[in-house]
Amino acid sequence: MSQQQSKRREQSGTGAPRGGAVWALVITSVAGFMAALDNLVVTTALPSIRKDLGGGLGDLEWTVSAYTLTFAVLLMFGAALGDRFGRRRMFLAGLTVFTGASAAAAMAPGIDSLIAARAVQGVGAAIMMPLTLTLLTAAVPAAKRGMAFGIWGAVNGLAVASGPLIGGSLTEHISWHWIFWLNVPLGLALLPLARLRLAESHGTGAPLDVTGTLLASGGLFGIVYGLVRGPADGWTSSYVLTGLVAGGALLVAFVVHGTRAKNPMLPMRLFRSRAFAGINAASLLMFLGMFGSIFLLSQYMQGVLGYSPTEAGLRMLPWTGMPMLVAPIAGILSDRIGGRPVVATGLFLQAAGLGYMAFVVTADASYAIQLPGLIISGIGMALFFAPAANLVMSSVRPSEQGIASGANNALREVGGALGIAVMGSIFAAQGGYETGQTFVDGLRPALVVGSAVVALAGIAALLIPAARRPTPVPESDEPAPVLETAAH
C-alpha cells in the first residue's frame, strides 16, 4: 500500500480495530454526555453551593458561565488541534483535562477555586466534544451512520435536557460535590478504552491558524460574555456593551480572514453549501429556544408549582427523556428519507410544544394539562439531534469534518447562552419572582418567543437541499457536494 493510500485510510478511519464502530459509539456517546451534562447540571445545586462555599449571586452565576464561556470559545480551536495533531490523541488530552478538572471542582475549598475548576472543565470539554463526532464518523460505515448518530444524539440530548434533574437529585439525596465526582469514574474508564479502541485520524495536515484562532476565540468570548452578563449587569453597562461590540468586531474580522487566508481555521467557502449553512442556522436557533425554555420551565415547576428539584426533573422526563426513545428511530429515518424532512418536522413539533406550554401555564396549572406540550416538545427535540449531526458531517469533506463539528458545537453553545439571556430578559421585563402570577406573566411571552425562534429554525432546515444518491467526494479545493445523507 502506498503512503498516500495509507494516509487516506487513516483519515477515513478504515484502519479502526475490528468492532471499532460499536466501541466508538459507546466511547463518544459517554464522552459527549459528560460534556453536555455540565452545561446545566449546576443550576439546581446553586443554593447548596452557596451555603457551603459562600459567595454572592454574581459568584454563583460564574459557576455556570465559566464553563459555558471556555467551552464555547475554544470549540473550534479544539477541533483544529485534533485535525493537526491527531484526533484520538487530542480527544484523550481533552478527556484527561476534563476528568481532572471535575475532581478539582468536587474538592474545591472555596467559590473562587470552584469557578476556576469549572473554567478548566470547559477547556477540556471544548477539545473533547467536537472530536466525538469526527471519531464516530470515521469508525462507522456510511450506511449505518444515521442509526449511530441517532444513539449519539439521544445520549447528548438527554444530557443537555436532564442536567437540572441529575444535579437536583444528587444535591438533594447525596451532596452537590457528586455533580462533579460523577465525571471522574466515567473519565477514568473511558481513557484506556479510547486509547485501545479508537483509530487515529488527522485532517488536512495544514498548520494551525493562529490568527483565526485568536479572532474566533476573542470574538466568541466577547459575545458570550455580554450575553451571559447582560441580564444581571444590564444591557447598557460598559462591560456588557464592550464585550458585545468588541466581540462582534472580532467575529467580522474572523469572517474576512476566513475568506482570504490560505489555510483558515473555518473556511468561509463551506457556507456556500446550503446544507452546511442551513443546518448550522437551524442548530443555533433551536438551542436558543430550547435552552431558554428549559432554564425558565425548570424554575417554574420548582418556584411556582412547588416541586422539589427531583420532582420537577421527573415531571419533565416526557420532554427530556424522549430522545432516548425516539432519536435512534430518527437516525434510521434520516438514512432512508434524508435528514431535511426529519429535522424540519422535529423543529416544528418543538415549536408547537413550546407554543402549547405558553398557552396553558398558570400559577396553579395541573401536570396533566402540561403533559401534551412536554411530549410534543420531547418528540421534536429527539427528531432534531440525530439527523442534524448527520447533516453536519455529510456536508463537508472527510478532512474537514473536525472543524465542521467544532463550528456546529460552538454555534449551539452560543445559541444556548443567547437563549438564556434573551428569554431571561423578556421574563424580567414582563414579570418577576415576586409571586406565582408575576412569574407566569414573564414566562408566557418568553415561551412565545422561544416557540417562534424554533419555528424559524424549522424554516432554516427547509433550505437544506433534498436528499439525493451519494456521490464520491473529491479531495480538492472546491466546495464539497451538497449531500443530505452521509456520503463519506
Image (cartoon, rainbow, N blue to C red):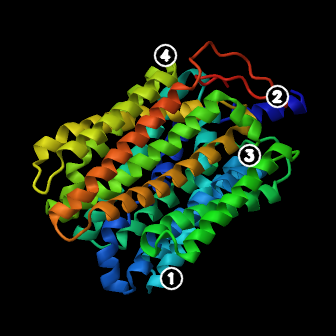
| Mark 2 nearby-residue class (10 Å; few <14, some 14–19, many ≥20) | few
Amino acid at dot 4? Arg
Check disc 2 and report the residue beneath it.
478
| Mark 1 nearby-residue class (10 Å; few <14, some 14–19, many ≥20) | some
Q: CA distance from mark 2 to mark 3?
A: 14 Å
In front: 367, or 401?
367
Check disc 3 and report the residue beneath it.
266
Element class at badge 2: loop
- Left-right relation of 149 to 198: left
Check disc 1 and report the residue beneath it.
113
Element class at badge 3: loop
Residue under the image location 32 percent in, 70 percent down: 45
Query: Is there CB contact under 8 Å for labels 3 and 1?
Result: no
Element class at badge 1: helix
Closer to viewer: mark 4 or mark 2: 2
Mark 4 or 2, nearer chain start = 4
- Left-right relation of 20 to 436: right
Q: CA distance from mark 3 to mark 1?
A: 34 Å
Q: CA distance from mark 4 to mark 3?
A: 30 Å
User: Which quadrant of the figure has residue 244?
Assistant: bottom right
Residue 336 badge: 4
Residue under the image location 68 percent in, 29 percent down: 273
Element class at badge 4: helix
Amino acid at dot 2? Glu
Q: CA distance from mark 4 to mark 1?
A: 50 Å
Mark 4 or 1, nearer chain start = 1
Residue 187 image position (x, y, % from top left): 51, 59
| Mark 3 nearby-residue class (10 Å; few <14, some 14–19, many ≥20) | many
Amino acid at dot 3? Leu
29 versus 386 height, above or below? below
